[in-house]
Image (spheres, grey):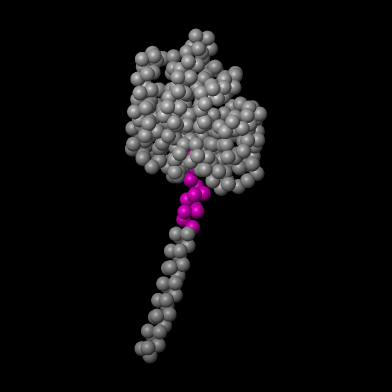
Amino acid sequence: MLPLISEVSLAIYKTYVAHTVSLLIFYYLLTPIVKEVVKIIDIHCHLTFKEYETDRGQVIEDAQAVLKRVVTSGVDPEDAKKALELADSHPDFILVALGLHPIHVVELTDHEITDYEDFISGNRMRIVGIGEIGLDYYWIRDPLKIKRTREVFKELLELVRELDLPVVLHLRGEGAIEDGLKFISDADIRKAVFHCFTGKPQLAMEICEEGYHISLPASIVRSKTMKKVAKKIPLSSLHAETDAPYLSPDEEVKRNVPQQVKVVYEEIARQKKCDLSTVENAIDTNFERMFGVRL
Ligand SMILES: [Zn+2]
């Protein structure tokens, strides 16, 4: 009797071991694939802004559950410091681009701008890009102020070249995208993303042919032109962003959050008639190529 019991026990034990081993193999093989599918990137948002004052920690935690990385963008000297501090407390999640939004250019003296450029240079190793910088003909109408923003934009592009970083461009209002394209071509900038692109598909095509990239925001859900851009330009030139707390895809909920970037991925997949994982893999590659970050 005894040998029979131990034979049965051995058989049960062997089955148990075999089952456990196959479960472990299944887990280790499949987990990275599952994680890959749900991890996406928001290449442009503003996590330092006052809209997140009361619940910033929770907003970041919620974003972390869905996203692989976010790039928060500093828009002026004060905001730049906050962005770097925030990234320090979330080292594997928040990346930083430092720039000077055109609407803040006119608030600063030459001396303050030089100091800020020195600050950016001093933090070269802590950032992945310069931006947002550019032109805003929508909010800035005074010719003297426009002249000032154009001069400062040109100067900041010299810094981009000097630091050998990609640039994230803010170009808004009639003719701003065309002017911005000329500025970066003249400055011989090689790596540029046209953030929150609102131009026509043909202009988007010209930009991509120059080797630059285009980033589409979550408000694509309401924009026929943006959908056409997503359809027309190659997947290898596209990025996705939220510009949160702005440009919410949901008209009822005004404050946007980084994980809403998923609607951009979904819309790109719809326009390209491909599956979501194709879009995710392409944008991952674009991100690594543009920002030099290994994901
Ligand atoms: Zn922005």
Residue at the extreme bottom: 1
Q: Position of residue 47 (x, y in %)?
A: 41, 32
Number of dots carrying numbers: 0
Q: Is residue 252 visible?
A: no
Q: Position of residue 89 (x, y in %)?
A: 33, 37
Query: Residue at the location (51% across, 13% down)?
Result: 146
Nearest the camera: 252 or 40?
40
Query: Residue at the location (36% across, 17% down)?
Result: 112
Q: Position of residue 139 (x, y in %)?
A: 52, 16
Q: Quadrant of residue 116?
A: top left
Q: Is residue 295 visible?
A: yes
Q: Main secondary structure of the magenta part?
A: helix
Query: Residue at the location (50% across, 12% down)?
Result: 147
Question: What range of the chain is rendered magenta?
Answer: 30-42
* As drawn, 13 above or below 249: below
* As drawn, 106 above or below 222: above
Inspect the magenta stretch and tell me whether residue 32 lies in it.
Answer: yes
Classify residue 199 as left or right of residue 127.
Answer: right
